[in-house]
Amino acid sequence: MTDNKMIIPDKFPVINLATANMVFPHVISQVFLRGQAGEAILKEALEDKHPCVFTTMSKLDVRNIPDRLYDIGVVADLEVVPEDFSVLLRGLYRVKVLSWERSIASNDEEGYWIAKVKRMEDRSEEFFIEKGKELVVHPDSRLFFKAVFSELKKFLEKFVEASGKDDAGAIGAILDNFENYDLSKKFAMDQLIWALLSVIPDATAADKQAVLISNGIFERIVAVSKLLVENIAIIQGGDAFSDALQKKIAADKSKSDNTTGNAGGGPAKNSDNFIQGAHPEVAEKYKKFLEIKQFMSEDAIRSIMDSLKRLKSVGRSRGEASGAEWTVFMTHVDFMLDTPWHQKTEEEADMNKVERVLDAEHYGLNFAKIPILRYLAAKRLNPKGRGDNLLFVGPPGVGKTSLANSIAGALGRKLVRLSLGGVRDEAEIRGHRKTYIGALAGQIMQEMRRAGVKNPVFVLDELDKITTDFRGDPSAALLEVLDPEQNHSFRDHYLDAPYDLSRVLFIATANTTSEIRPALLDRLEPITLPGYTTYEKMQIAKRFLIPKAILNVGLTEHNINLCWLNDEPDETLLSIIKGYTKESGVRNLERRIRTICRSLAQEYLKDKENFKSPVLTQDYLVKVFGQPKYSEERANKTEIGEVIGLAWTPFGGDILRVQSKLYNYQKFSVLQTGMQGKVMIEAGQVALSLLRDVLEKVGEADTMNNKFIHIHVPEGAIEKDGPSAGITTFCSLYSAARKKVARPYIAMTGEVTLTGMVTRIGGVKEKVIAAESAGIKEVIMPETNKRDLDEVPRSAKDKIKFHFVNNIDQVLDIVFEKTNPA
């Protein structure tokens, strides 16, 4: 506790522990707070409002709160664990509730309960005497307690022997530390008993609550000893059964291999020891387990058997299949049984058919399809071969997710999808321990369970949208999922056993690789989907988007058709693409087409009898969408000091205007505006230095003297950065300094050095597509990028004249052709 916390002496927020994961005095327990009440308490704890809370259990046969809560519990010190969004509860002392109240208005379900309590003390016993501020054992009682704790130690030794040293867990640790307890003091006795009670495996909530209520140390010692003896009996019986079971399975296996083909052997005809003593529901789960056991790893077998044994113990002690503890372990068993340990789907072997399906469902994207088909062919030849997983990178709306869906359909595999946008908790990937309150498997294993097979196509959407906070880094957990050297033994905390993910075809999607952790990106094979040309957008609209919109809006059912201008949709689609969309993908284009269909549906319902589909002219588009928002005229720039560059963004390519002006001033000064990033600002400084050299060569060196130079990139709300605007910035400054006007419909991209060399840049494909969409007729780019044109769609290259340059003089000759006298 921190000194600045103020403890309320008799009122505390209530934490309903619900299951047997109880809190005891002098014991630290980790708890995950769930639900609105838990989140409210946690939020206030983070604000240091609550140093302590009242912890209690629930009665199984009562529905309403607070009636279902036990009125005897433990006040605990609360400490938040930021790493996994849990709290540590350090038990302080037992209390009895005097009254209950709500933290806010009683009818508000978002509040939590507050308990007014009174501290409980053990009754005065002749076993102890006061010594200072402590209770110590009376001299006459020393031999008695020595014998009592000697017997308790023997029980601990038997428990460890029956369990095995490696499986004894916390009880083994207590035994190792037994001699360190000063059992001449009552406080140390309490510490030992409460610690034991908190870790006895098969003690029910009712058992623990009975011990918590008792007001004498000797009563608690007797109760804990009894629980240990019961556990030892369960473990010994389980081991005897396990030995017999292994022999039985081996015998059944040899008999069934030549008859039924069930290599794992079915359940024994005669009920064995485990089934005889188990609840019918547990026995049924156990039989299902035997059917799939042969496909499970040793760790998985151990994990599910631990839960089955616990269920057998709980069912026997209560005589009924109910309660929070029963639910926790039954849920775990069900999950383990439903997990696909061996099921798989047969994959389509004909790669020609796979290629035909991809071509039929996706127009264009040839540069993406080629590496995809090569990857799938290698996987088909050697399914066990390890290699990088696919990563589709591109702006929104280019078909990353739908392409992954088509791959699954073409291969005949099951498809599962997980959206990673906003995932910030590592446990969402790797799961929680099964013993935590509200524990669940991670999203990876939940989706595998939903798929029902070991070899689905697993789409990890929005990989670049993962966030990180105090609950951990989900991308770190994904390293094991996507690493081909590790994912054959991926371990989810909830399963507590390795699971083979090597047969899964993982396909991730992202808008950009810059936001992906480098170590994670190293496990992926990026395939870029740069966007579509105008021609490709028109083909996609005619083949996919228009039929889909007509069907979805319901026009087909009423025989309503779209009437195109001149009976051909190309002119209308071109007007929509050029005037109402500005994107690399087709998502907004699909929205526009859907809006037209909805407009027709509205007109039809107004007058069904006289309805006639209007011709989709430019006037009709204005009626539906308003005036065009974009125009090719934006590429026609003839002002002094303004030139057009090409830029890459996470949402595709775009044109980038750079404007410069020179003003007379008292001294030389530079201002760069328009949300320019650090790299772009440095490019401007290089361009200024290079401009001085160029002006000196033509005898105009004094042009820069006593000048205030303003370099501006419009659309100032959008952040811009990158080195490829080097020649654009230089040409803008050159235009302003020499009062020359750049030629219209020409754009450029390239980095420039102090010596005037034009160097290589990236994103050629996206930039050329953006230039074609904006009506650019000529593009200047570095000579070293000439080979990158092979990746640009032919429909875009055919409309543009390309100039490949090595130095800034070549750029000036093209941009300021002899139409501008020196």
Image: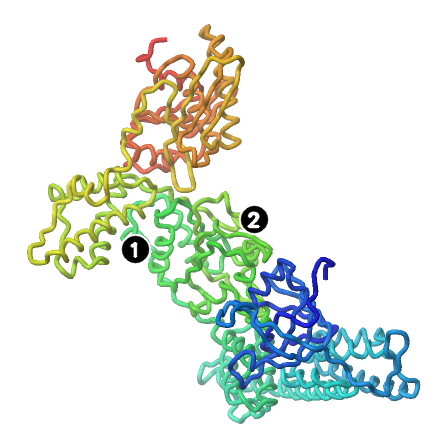
Dot 2 and dot 1 residues touching (CB under 8 Å):
no
Q: Is residue 251 left or right of residue 174?
A: left
Amino acid type for the residue under numbered disc 2: Ala
- Residue drawn at x 13%, y 56% is 606
**Front-most of residues 26 and 143:** 26
Q: Is residue 521 above or below residue 68?
A: above
Q: Is residue 581 left or right of residue 490?
A: left
Which mark sits nearer the N-terminus, 2 or 1? 1
**Front-most of residues 787 and 465:** 465
The residue that mark 1 highlights is: 357
Question: Which mark identifies residue 348?
Answer: none
2 or 1: mark nearer the eye: 2
The residue that mark 2 highlights is: 519
Which residue is situated farthest in the top direction here? Answer: 699
Colour scheme employed for the rendering of this structure:
rainbow
Tell me which corner region of the image, top left, top right, bottom left or bottom right, holds residue 782: top left
Tell me which corner region of the image, top left, top right, bottom left or bottom right, holds residue 645: top left
**Front-most of residues 428 and 218:** 218
Residue 24, position as x, y percentages in the image: 70, 76
**Front-most of residues 651 and 294:** 651
Screen quadrant of the N terminus: bottom right
Mark 2 neighbour density, 10 Å: few (under 14) some (14–19) many (20 or more): few
Q: Is residue 296 above or below residue 411?
A: below
Residue 30, position as x, y percentages in the image: 65, 68
Residue 221, position as x, y percentages in the image: 77, 85
Residue 217, position as x, y percentages in the image: 78, 84
Amino acid type for the residue under numbered disc 1: Val
Q: Is residue 393 above or below residue 118?
A: above
What distance separates the C-alpha of mark 2 from that of mark 1?
34 Å
Label 1: state its secondary structure.
helix
